[in-house]
Amino acid sequence: MAPVTEKTGAGEKITIPRHVAIIMDGNGRWAKRRGLPRTAGHAVGSENFRKIATYCKNIGMDYLTVYAFSTENWKRPADEVSAIMKLLKKYLDEAVATMERDKIRMKVFGNVKTLPEELRKLVAKTDEISARYEGFQANICLNYGGRDEIITAAKRYAADLLEGRAARELTEEVFSSYLYSAGIPDPELIIRTGGEQRISNFLLWQCAYSELYYTDTFWPDFGPAELDKAIAAYNARDRRFGGVK
């Protein structure tokens, strides 16, 4: 599908990226500033994801990928990890209940084998429902790390090569087909909320030519207007992909 455009009030055309990825940072600090436990920030952040995903679908975006829980996040306090897992279960439970009705797709990127069994079953159910529909897709990076994804893809390719199932010439296209994001275009825009300016092991292969946008706004406060600012900034970039215009 070609990029979607919409006219602003001034008549200017704005290109909506096909795929936007977001590092949803700042939940804990948002809560701390309000005298609340960090888990309260994660709860508000979870609801904000639902709002932003709906907005992305409504403006014509094809894919939204969010960083929900990294392979490094297991180092956090046990009570915080437990609270995040409960929130993820709650969200996936609700998603299973509404995906069929709304005909939306959801994909989980990451090593789900080490997740609690109830989460693994919910992930499998969302895969089953998603296979029946086309259109907007939300991708949730859960127990995900960019380096881990690349190593996992390399091992899968090597196994297929030994069994005669893979082409001997390894190209970028072939390798991409072994990633969690197989079949999905790379994100044109990656947004990080919360003020930090680093990629934090997120979509390391896929971000080769992504535009990076950083904002001090904490994720719970990152609403549609903030996303519009990021998309406007993306439209102001000169994307040459190593060439010359």
Image (cartoon, rainbow, N blue to C red):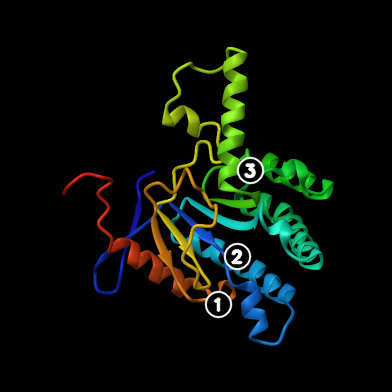
Q: Quadrant of residue 158?
A: top right
Kindly report the distance in space between the C-alpha atoms of the residues bearing marks 2 and 1: 11 Å
Q: In this rendering, which labeled residue sits more in front, label 3 or label 2?
A: 2
The answer to whether 229 appears left or right of 146 in the picture is left
Kindly report the distance in space between the C-alpha atoms of the residues bearing marks 1 and 3: 29 Å
The answer to whether 188 appears left or right of 106 in the picture is left
Q: Residue furthest top?
A: 164
Q: Amino acid at mark 2?
A: Phe
Q: Amino acid at mark 3?
A: Ser
Residue on which disc 2 sits? 49
- The residue nearer to you, when weighing 79 against 141, is 79
Res 105 label: none
Image location (x, y in percent) of residue 106: 62, 49
The answer to whether 14 appears left or right of 167 in the picture is left
- The residue nearer to you, when weighing 228 against 205, is 205
Image location (x, y in percent) of residue 215: 45, 72
- Mark 3 closeness class: few <14, some 14–19, many ≥20 residues within 10 Å: many
Q: Quadrant of residue 17?
A: bottom left
Residue found at x 44% / y 61%: 59
Q: In this rendering, which labeled residue sits more in front, label 1 or label 3?
A: 1
Compare marks 3 and 2 and give the one earlier in the sequence: 2
Residue found at x 77% / y 66%: 77
Disc 1 to disc 3: CB gap under 8 Å: no
Residue on which disc 1 sits? 221
Element assignment for label 1: helix
Residue on which disc 3 sits? 130
Q: Is residue 114 above or below residue 173?
A: below
Element assignment for label 3: helix
Q: Residue furthest front?
A: 75
Element assignment for label 2: helix
